[in-house]
Amino acid sequence: MKRPTIIDIAREVGVSKAAVSYALNGRAGVSAQTRDRILDVAASMGWRASSAARALSNDRAASVGIVLARSPEDLRTEPFFMQIVTGLEQTLSVHGFSVQFALTADTDTELATYRRWWAERRVDGVLATDLRVSDPRPAVLRDLGTPAVFFGTAETMAGIPVMRVDDADVVTSAIEHLTGLGHRRIGHVQGPLDLRHTVRRGEVLQLIARESPGLTVTHAPGDYTEEGGVRATRRLLAARNPPTAIIYDNDVMAVAAVVHAAELGVRVPEELSVLAWDDSMLCRVVRPAVSAFAHNIVADAATAARMLLELIETGVADDAALTPRRLVPRASTATAPTRRRST
């Protein structure tokens, strides 16, 4: 007779594989009633824990790692990553896990950090974000055998669960909002060009422009910082036919454009509408307040944490989707000017 597995028990009880693992290993994370039900079903199915599995469980670090190849300036000004850490910590702490955080200067150092953590048994798994063009990290993590979840990718990944995102829907919504206000010349201040989602957003914007007569989209690379956002905005506004609206790939660059509008020689929103990809407190407190796409990053990070725990406990976890982004129109987007702004 086939030896029952955690997956068999989870299917019979109607709970997740991680919940079964918590119950069988006497760990927090499930209610007393659910634990009793799982134990009863496991006993009736003749389940027995293997000695190897018990040894692995006892040897755990009870820690999950996240490495960011970003500058300290990015973390100082951008709320996105602190919300991710908050969602991770809130969920992992309930299960007795902590978050180990590292900031690195480049991809090579990030890879070295993963190798060191895994060799020293510092972490039981990692959350990775910012999938790059020709990214070496998935292959390295698979080779190491490190349980990993990738946060915010448009495609599935062999052997690694992902938190999927559909940038196409958000790009379409942004364009519909701006063209509905009469804008036909739209700028796009991008994030770093080595990031996969930056490339995809640009591709979708150009596809929409090609299919929309009279609509033009012009790109300028940024770096997610205040200074980078201002430089890219100045470059777009210096064109012979400057955009009347600009989409920014993060909140910091969008808010920077509003704050520095006077020195850029433009009024927001009378001459230039500003729309941010990510909503944050920065978008809400600046004046005029910035139109942006709101989404629950803390809840998404909590989902990623649960996926990681399930992957660590059972060896498998299903993909999940990021919470949908919702456009929040504010004072920074308005009807396109009827006269062309002089440059």
Image: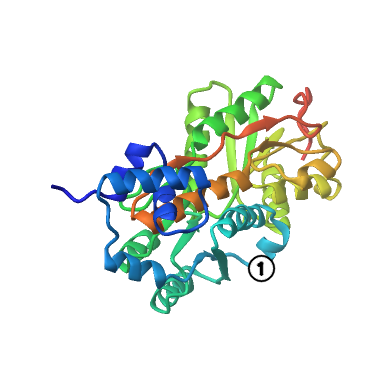
Q: Residue furthest left?
A: 1
**Residue at 57 percent of width and 65 percent of height:** 98
The C terminus: image quadrant:
top right
Q: Which residue position is annotated with label 1?
A: 72
Nearest the eye: 6 or 47:
47
What amino acid is found at the position of numbered circle 1 in the picture?
Pro
Q: Position of residue 245 (x, y in %)?
A: 70, 34
Depth check, front residue: 209 or 306? 306
What residue is at 61 percent from the left and 24 percent from the top? 176
Dividing the picture into quarters, in which one does residue 76 lie?
bottom right
Q: How many numbered circles are shown?
A: 1
Q: Please tell me which residue is depicted at 39% across the width and 57% down the height of the picture.
A: 313
Residue 81 image point, x, y percent: 63, 56
Whether residue 193 sits left or right of residue 271 in the image: it is left
Tell me where residue 136 appears, x and y as whole percent: 37, 63
The residue lying toward the viewer, choosing from 183 and 343, is 183
Q: At which x and y percent is residue 232?
A: 67, 51
Q: Is residue 97 above or below residue 105?
A: above
> Which residue shows up at 62% across the image and 54% down it?
90
Say if 216 sits above or below 154 in the image: above
- The relative height of residue 306 versus residue 288 in the rendered view (above or below) is below
> Dot 1, how many residues are within 10 Å of its Cα: few (below 14), some (14-19), or many (20+)?
few
Q: Is residue 249 visible?
A: no
In the foreground, 309 or 42: 42
What is the image's colouring? Answer: rainbow
The answer, for residue 199, to whether it is visible in the render is: yes
The vertical placement of 98 against 264, above or below, is: below
Mark 1 lies on a secondary structure that is helix
